[in-house]
């Protein structure tokens, strides 16, 4: 057996089969930094052994090879996403170790290494930052269609706190999404899909070179599909809807040192997003005790009112101007985003019009401006400096209606409150790196952030009837310094690094608020990480291993209020965790790429002795799951000690495996691909929601398969997809919602369909 064969076998036996398929060809992103170095090698077809090529990332706000970046980052190129059938952000998690990206009741729920947030409302942002075309997204409600990028560029997931380079709200990590940039050639793409649940999707893109220096690119998508949850109360399907997206990008490159990009995008959608399903009847279901209603029998069935409509509009625009002046790259990024959503939800989860939540107007407007200077000096020292300003004005107008508030008929429309939430953030960061030798480099830097935010609230007559004020104002200011230190030894094929970094999540104001309240304390996290990245077999095998430990103080978490039954935020003392993540990919022969990931994560709460407690009347049985158990309002001060309990969305083990194989069929070419991920059990709420232990998902495996064939020329592709191929029943969210009952939201069942695409 040859040395090469021995190395491949050893890699597979020691985890190489659990690898991460990152990309097959060199790719650049649409970050605000300089263009990728021209000297980096591209993936070409030669008589040499097959290689994986290079992928260019901007994780450190510079264009660099993924291999050279001393950060735990997974990057997925458009080519890799298409070949593996990764169709949206939810699919990307299948190739990212330690991550969980899902959608619950219209919110993007993003978790990395056990740090995330289920519902980020105005005033409390998510701790996993999302950057779209270099601009930070302030909110995650209603953005799900926007995050399913039309005509995408490279997608990057940075794991662990990124406080220095990305600032506030990056204690869990950063997701960088980019749309494809205009190019200098005429090209286009038209694609269509049809699948289960009458799924219809049409994508289009056209790239037009206007002159030698000016080009424009247009892209769009229309999506329409039925729901996958059957409502036995009406016989209708819930969970479906439609959306359309339009984007235009203009790029001007008058010379080699100037690159100006202007982009605008509009997205509108209408979906039945709030498809929560009652998990148990009376006596746990309060309304069921008098109405006699029962939950549906099927896992994908519900029995409730059809008020669950989510309407959303998003408009964004940005201007990125990049200039090279001598040894310096200067970049300005200006962005504006406006969004508005409406939601109506049956929150007693029965056919009775008892408790209806109305999000009458939720959204806001965000403006941000960033300036950045990056040096390209010939000596051993280089640096990066930047300043950032963000101004956000959000609104949260909600109402509570239904029979539960019928006694407030004099108010007209039940209790209601409007919150105007203002946020202003200013930060400056600097980072330098110094080459001690040709192979040893030290990086050091820091960021200073100042945030100020306030809520102006107005209660209608309904809430005033409960003794709440007609109007109120409260707020707070927060500041932090977040340093970073990295020591890296890189000899080309091997990159070994140690990093210490701090992260900062701004203090929050919990909304919707009906009176003044104390601001949430900021989250502050520090993390130690040791990583090893390696390229072997002449570029045919890439591996990456990271070991980490973090401690996050004053974790902001959302809980069910044990006295009122509503949700609220509180500081949970903190969470600490440690673990290991391994990813690699191998191309043993031309056309075949195999990959996967393997991760271990241990997390636990600390300083969380006074956690809010969900209360249950055991009716003398002593068993919270006995038939006589009833959810009851807790007495004031009911608490429990959660020290040592694991964090939410933190499965102990995750493993994934994927493969893509290209092969000829006569004069045609074909591709078959599959990706599967296994994860152990995890909790949706601290301590699984309370003594019922309902808010927990057991271990499960998801597998997707796809493929296509293409005639000579590769302009036309005809393909198929099967998602959740083994029809695994799992929940994307579970909750104990005192006093109305327990409920869940089912993940999508098996879906399948056909695709056709034509490129010119």
Image (spheres, rainbow, N blue to C red):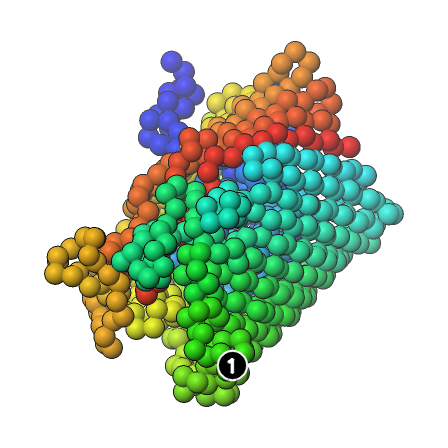
Which of the two residues, 295 or 632, is positioned nearer the viewer here?
Answer: 295
Q: Please, what secondary structure does the residue beneath circle 1 have?
A: helix
Residue furthest toward the front? Answer: 291
Image coords of residue 611 (percent x, y): 26, 68
Identify the residue at horizontal 58%, vertical 28% (top origin).
720
Q: Is residue 656 visible?
A: no
82 relative to 371, above or below: above
**Is 625 left, or right, of 529 in this rendering?**
left
Which of the two residues, 503 or 196, is positioned nearer the viewer here?
Answer: 196
Which of the two residues, 534 or 135, is positioned nearer the viewer here?
Answer: 135
Which of the two residues, 640 or 350, is positioned nearer the viewer here?
Answer: 350
Identify the residue at horizontal 71%, vertical 47% (top origin).
220
465 relative to 310, above or below: below
Identify the residue at horizontal 29%, vertical 56% (top origin).
282
Identify the residue at horizontal 39%, vertical 42% (top origin).
299
Image coords of residue 506 (percent x, y): 45, 72
Which quadrant holds the N terminus?
A: top left
The residue that label 1 is drawn on is 411
Which quadrant holds the C terminus?
A: top right
Image coords of residue 432 (percent x, y): 52, 62
Image coords of residue 384 (percent x, y): 57, 62
């Amino acid at each position: 057996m040859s040395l090469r064969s021995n190395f491949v076998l050893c890699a597979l036996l020691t985890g190489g089969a659990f690898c991460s398929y990152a990309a097959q060809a060199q790719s650049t992103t649409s970050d605000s930094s300089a263009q990728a170095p021209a000297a980096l090698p591209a993936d070409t077809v030669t008589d040499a052994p097959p290689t994986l090529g290079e992928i260019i990332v901007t994780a450190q706000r510079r264009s660099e090879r993924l291999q050279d970046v001393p950060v735990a980052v997974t990057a997925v190129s458009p080519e890799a996403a298409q070949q593996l059938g990764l169709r949206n952000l939810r699919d990307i998690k299948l190739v990212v170790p330690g991550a969980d990206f899902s959608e619950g009741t219209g919110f993007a729920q993003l978790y990395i290494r056990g740090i995330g947030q289920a519902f980020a409302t105005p005033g409390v942002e998510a701790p996993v930052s999302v950057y779209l075309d270099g601009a930070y997204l302030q909110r995650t409600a209603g953005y799900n269609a926007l995050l399913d990028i039309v005509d995408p560029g490279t997608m990057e997931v940075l794991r662990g706190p990124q406080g220095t380079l990305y600032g506030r709200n990056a204690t869990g990590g950063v997701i960088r999404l980019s749309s494809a940039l205009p190019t200098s050639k005429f090209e286009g793409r038209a694609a269509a899909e049809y699948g289960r649940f009458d799924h219809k999707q049409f994508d289009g893109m056209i790239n037009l070179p206007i002159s030698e220096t000016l080009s424009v690119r247009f892209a769009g998508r229309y999506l329409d599909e039925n729901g996958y949850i059957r409502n036995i109360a009406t016989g209708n399907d819930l969970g479906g809807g439609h959306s359309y997206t339009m984007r235009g990008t203009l790029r001007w490159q008058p010379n080699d040192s100037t690159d100006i990009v202007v982009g605008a995008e509009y997205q509108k959608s209408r979906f039945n997003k709030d498809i929560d399903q009652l998990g148990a009847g009376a006596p746990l279901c309060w309304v069921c005790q008098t109405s006699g209603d029962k939950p549906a029998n099927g896992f994908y069935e519900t029995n409730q009112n059809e008020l669950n409509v989510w309407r959303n509009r998003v408009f964004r625009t940005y201007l990125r101007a990049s200039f090279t002046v001598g040894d310096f790259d200067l970049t300005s990024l200006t962005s504006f985003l406006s969004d508005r959503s409406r939601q109506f939800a049956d929150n007693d989860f029965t056919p009775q019009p008892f408790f209806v939540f109305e999000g009458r107007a939720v959204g806001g407007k965000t403006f941000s401006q960033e300036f950045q200077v990056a040096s390209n000096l010939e000596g051993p020292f280089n640096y990066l400096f930047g300043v950032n300003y963000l101004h956000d004005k959000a609104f949260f107008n909600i109402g509570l209606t239904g029979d539960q508030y019928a006694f407030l008929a004099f108010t007209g429309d039940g209790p209601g409150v409007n919150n105007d939430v203002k946020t202003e953030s200013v930060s400056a960061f600097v980072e330098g790196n110094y080459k001690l030798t040709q192979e040893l480099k030290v990086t050091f830097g820091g960021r200073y952030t100042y945030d100020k935010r306030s809520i102006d609230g107005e209660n209608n007559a309904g809430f005033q009837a409960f003794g709440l004020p007609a109007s109120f104002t409260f707020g707070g200011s927060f500041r932090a310094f977040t340093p970073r230190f990295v020591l890296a030894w890189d000899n080309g094929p091997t990159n070994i690094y140690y990093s210490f970094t701090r992260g900062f999540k701004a203090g929050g104001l919990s909304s919707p608020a009906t009176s003044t309240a104390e601001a949430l304390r900021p989250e502050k996290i520090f993390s130690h990480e040791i990583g090893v990245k390696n390229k072997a077999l002449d570029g045919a095998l890439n591996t990456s291993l990271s070991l980490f430990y973090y401690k996050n103080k004053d974790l902001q978490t959302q809980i069910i209020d044990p006295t009122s039954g509503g949700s609220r935020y509180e500081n949970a003392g903190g969470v600490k965790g440690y673990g290991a993540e391994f990813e690699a990919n191998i191309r043993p022969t031309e056309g075949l790429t195999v990959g996967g990931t393997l991760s271990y994560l241990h997390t636990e709460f600390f300083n969380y002795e006074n956690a809010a407690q969900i209360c249950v009347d055991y009716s003398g049985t002593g068993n919270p799951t006995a038939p006589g158990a009833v959810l009851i309002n807790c007495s004031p001060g009911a608490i429990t000690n959660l020290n040592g309990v694991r964090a939410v969305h933190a499965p102990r083990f995750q493993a994934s495996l994927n493969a893509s194989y290209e092969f000829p069929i006569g004069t045609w070419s074909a591709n078959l691909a599959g990706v599967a991920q296994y994860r152990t059990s995890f909790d949706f709420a601290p301590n699984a929601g309370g003594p019922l232990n309902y808010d927990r998902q057991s271990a499960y495996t998801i597998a997707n398969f796809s493929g296509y064939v293409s005639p000579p020329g590769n302009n036309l592709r005809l393909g198929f997809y099967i998602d959740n191929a083994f029809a695994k029943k799992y929940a994307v969210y579970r909750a104990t919602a005192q006093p109305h009952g327990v409920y869940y939201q089912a993940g999508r069942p098996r879906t399948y369909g056909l695709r056709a695409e034509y490129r010119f």
